[in-house]
Image (cartoon, grey):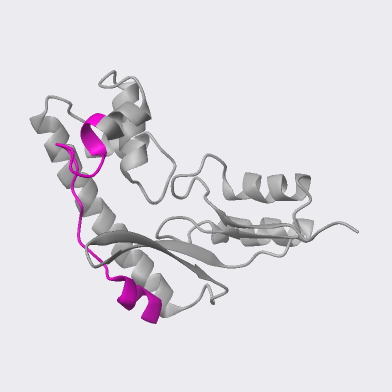
Amino acid sequence: MHPFRADLHCHSTCSDGTLTPTELIHLAVKLNLKALSITDHDTIGAYKEALEEAKKVQLPLISGVEFSTTYKKTNVHVLAYSFSLDSVEIQKLCKFHCHRRTLRNQMILDLLKMHQMPIDEIELKQSTPAAMIGRPHIALLMMKKGYVRSVKEAFHLYLGENKPCYHPGEKVSTEETIEI
């Protein structure tokens, strides 16, 4: 008898993953997983594409999302599972996070410009298919533009916490997120 295997924490290109939602579904089938949950950062956008594909291949798909939160000045990622994708509260929280990330990204781009590493917001959006753009996408573009040699270097020198181009963005409490 084969053990029940599932992946309940993976990311698609809707946030910082490297595979599209459809590709994740097919990889799960190839790996003989019995269930999957796509837990993109602060978005449930992958499910528009993933639900239909999961039905086609008869793979149980569990709703999921990974919210960025703060608890007592510490960044905490909260994973939520098995909620209705039509939940107004979840959709509202995702929309808030999208707005929060957009403002944060603009602050980071302003800091990069001050450090002679200009990146235009339009250029950033065109560089990735992700709906939820974050620091990894900025780091990739920094590398592509020759400002750094690697994503790791971008974080180590500029984008990591307490680095010159880091901006924390607006905080969302862990407690508030759990309550929702």
- The reply to whether residue 153 is visible in this rendering is yes
Quadrant holding the C terminus: bottom left
Q: Residue furthest left?
A: 114
Q: Main secondary structure of the magenta part?
A: loop
* Magenta run includes residue 169: yes
Residue at (23%, 46%) from the top-left corner?
105
- The reply to whether residue 180 is visible in this rendering is no
Quadrant holding the N terminus: bottom right
Residue 65, compared with residue 155, is above or below; it is below
- The front one of 36 and 128 is 36
Q: Which residues are magenta?
A: 157-180
Give the side of residue 61 with respect to residue 160, left or right.
right
Q: Position of residue 13 (x, y in %)?
A: 49, 45
Residue at (52%, 72%) from the top-left corner?
85
Using the rendered view, name the quadrant where residue 59 is placed: bottom right
Give the side of residue 167 with respect to residue 9, left or right.
left
Q: Position of residue 166 (x, y in %)?
A: 19, 43
Using the rendered view, name the quadrant where residue 139 is placed: top left
Q: Position of residue 121 (x, y in %)?
A: 24, 39
* Magenta run includes residue 168: yes
Residue at (81%, 58%) from the top-left corner?
3
